[in-house]
Amino acid sequence: EAGVTQFPSHSVIEKGQTVTLRCDPISGHDNLYWYRRVMGKEIKFLLHFVKESKQDESGMPNNRFLAERTGGTYSTLKVQPAELEDSGVYFCASSRVTSSTEQFFGPGTRLTVL
Amino acid sequence: GNSVTQMEGPVTLSEEAFLTINCTYTATGYPSLFWYVQYPGEGLQLLLKATKADDKGSNKGFEATYRKETTSFHLEKGSVQVSDSAVYFCALIQANQAGTALIFGKGTTLSVSS
């Protein structure tokens, strides 16, 4: 089966601009997670969808970040307006059921804000 | 709160050398423990896991044992190869909350030369 895919692989934008990241989970996986790794630091949880509902968004850093998963398939993460500290690698992961401890990760989107 | 601490890198080894990457954790209860690996240009892949004390996870010649008494999950391999060059992340999920976020360490970069 196809793995988790993310688009774009790399985005370079100016401070104040808007960027939208996309994640396509493995087909049939109800659970979708967003994580972020800022340079040299831990990979940190942002939020968790179960189908189209936000199960946990406690990791979202502020209201400049908006995640959606309309229809319970792919998800988007929009940053508006982007700030310098938003630079990092954004990972998406999915799992089939909520009780599964194994999450399958995509390759990540590297975001650079200048 | 829950946290994971792993040794700082980079770790540079010659082929066939012995590898240890230390990982300790702080958590309430009995978390599940994981090692993820990120090869260049790829997403995170689950390398191995252990779900209870004294369990040993193993895969591709790598091993890690869940030590509750020392709250550790050190990664070892007896003879590394150039193809093992990657970033290794130790992580946990809090027990009985399998649908929630992975908590990661900062990652350790391993570079193996021939």
Image (cartoon, grey):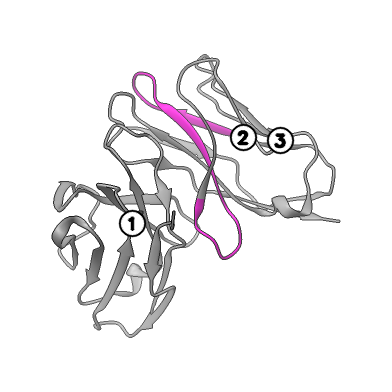
Q: Name the secondary structure under disc 3.
A: loop
Q: Secondary structure at mark 2?
A: loop
Q: Is residue A88 visible?
A: yes
Residue ID for mark 2: B22
**Circle 1 sits on which residue?**
A25
Pick whichever of labels 2 and 3 is earlier in the sequence. Answer: 2
Q: Is residue A68 magenta?
A: no
Disc 3 + disc 1, Cβ < 8 Å? no
* Quarter of the figure with the C terminus of chain B: bottom right
Residues flagged by tags 3 and 1 on a common chain: no
Check the residue under mark 2 and report the chain it is in: B
Would residue A50 be found to the left or right of residue B9 on screen? left
Residue A90 visible here: no
Judging depth in this view, the residue of A49 and B86 nearest the camera is A49
Callout 3: few (<14), some (14-19), or many (20+) C-alpha neighbours within 10 Å?
A: few
Decide whether residue B28 is among the magenta residues.
yes
How far across and how far down the image is residue B48, in percent? 55, 35
Q: Nearer the viewer, mark 1 or mark 2?
A: 1
Give the residues in magenta. B22-44
Q: CA distance from mark 2 to mark 3?
A: 17 Å
Q: Are marks 2 and 3 on the same chain?
A: yes
- Which residue bears the numbered disc 3? B61
Q: Residues within 10 Å of mark 2 (few under 14, many from 20)?
A: some
Residue B8 in the image: above or below residue B49: below
Q: CA distance from mark 1 to mark 2?
A: 31 Å
For residue A11, side relative to residue A77 (left or right): right
| Viewer-nearest of discs 3 and 1 | 1
* Secondary structure beneath label 1: loop
Q: Which amino acid does the dot numbered 2 rest on? A: Asn
Name the residue rendered at 40%, 36% in the picture: B3
Q: Quadrant of residue B20?
A: top right
Q: CA distance from mark 3 to mark 1?
A: 29 Å
